Amino acid sequence: MEHLWILLAISFVVSAVGWIYFVYFFSIGYGLSISALAAATAIIFHNSLDIPSAILLGVLFVYGIRLSAYLLIRERKSASYKKILYQPEISQRKPFFVMMMIWISCALLYVGQISPATFYLANLAEGEAINEWWMWGGAITAALGVVIEMIADAEKSAAKKRNPNRFVSHGLYRIVRCPNYFGEVLMWTGSFVVCIGSCCSAWQWVVAALGYIGIVYVMFSGARRLELRQAEVYGSDPEFQAYIKRTPILIPLIPIYSVAKHKWLQA
């Protein structure tokens, strides 16, 4: 249990970048926190680290660094992203209590997300009958999720350079409208299933489940924000209307084409 307190302290310190600018709690602070927590987990449990857990933690570390770098570069170079990032309703200063609650929530969420790998290694160190095949499966699934996210980001960047005024509908975007968010859901699904073979106790399952449910909620919330924003920009385009009616919003092959009406997804 003590290792969780160490990770929580690290999560608070790194995610504190959000005090510089509110949105950083969820963006740059998120990526840096995941990388820091993955590295810290590997260091704390270096004596128990096996190949599949090292791969999973490596995947999460690389994911966090890539995400933070990608967001920083986009903030500096993309005029359209700056316009969204610094619009008045986002950039206005939040009350201290609100900032504290968000900071605490983010720090707890990030620890919950990384916890399956932590529990695997902690229980392995205690001699529990761990099934490493679940860790192998989780690591491979997480890696696939990161690859999907990287491809989706590259496709979108290339498409916007060619035509910044058109929505993206080729490549992975032909399969799902938010492939980058899907890639992240897949990555955290891979991380979460590790618990199945980790001999987790009830409280460990609760912590891991809250982290997983929390990030899936955030991804659906992000998909909803994107849907509303795209509706404002492309809503009058018949080609766009045809695209959104045939392409699921977040999960491939699952016929959920809109989440705009679900206000409870507003985060």
Image (cartoon, grey):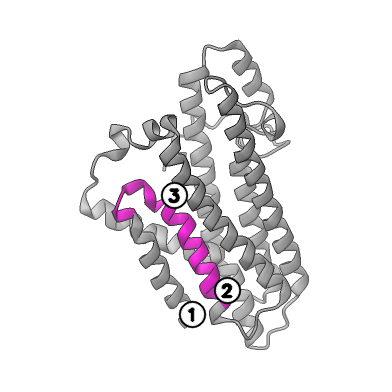
Question: Relative to 162, does residue 144 appear above or below in the rendering?
Answer: below
Circles 1 and 2: CB atoms closer than 8 Å: yes
In the image, 38 versus 198, the foreground residue is 38
Instruction: State yes or no: residue 29 in magenta.
Output: yes
The magenta stretch spans which residues?
A: 18-42
Identified by mark 1, the residue type is His
Quarter of the view holding residue 175? top right
Identified by mark 3, the residue type is Ser
Q: Earlier in the sequence, mark 3 or mark 2?
A: 3
Q: Position of 24 compared to 192: left or right?
A: left
Identified by mark 2, the residue type is Thr
Q: Secondary structure at mark 2?
A: helix
Q: Secondary structure at mark 3?
A: loop
- Residue 32, position in %: x, y? 46, 59
Residue under the point 52% across and 16% down: 235
Nearer the observer: mark 1 or 3; the answer is 3
Residue ID for mark 3: 27
Q: Position of 156 compared to 109: left or right?
A: right
Disc 1 to disc 3, C-alpha distance: 25 Å
In the image, 122 versus 206, the foreground residue is 122
- Which numbered tag is attached to residue 118? 2
- Which numbered tag is attached to residue 3? 1
Nearer the observer: mark 3 or 2; the answer is 3
Q: Earlier in the sequence, mark 1 or mark 2?
A: 1
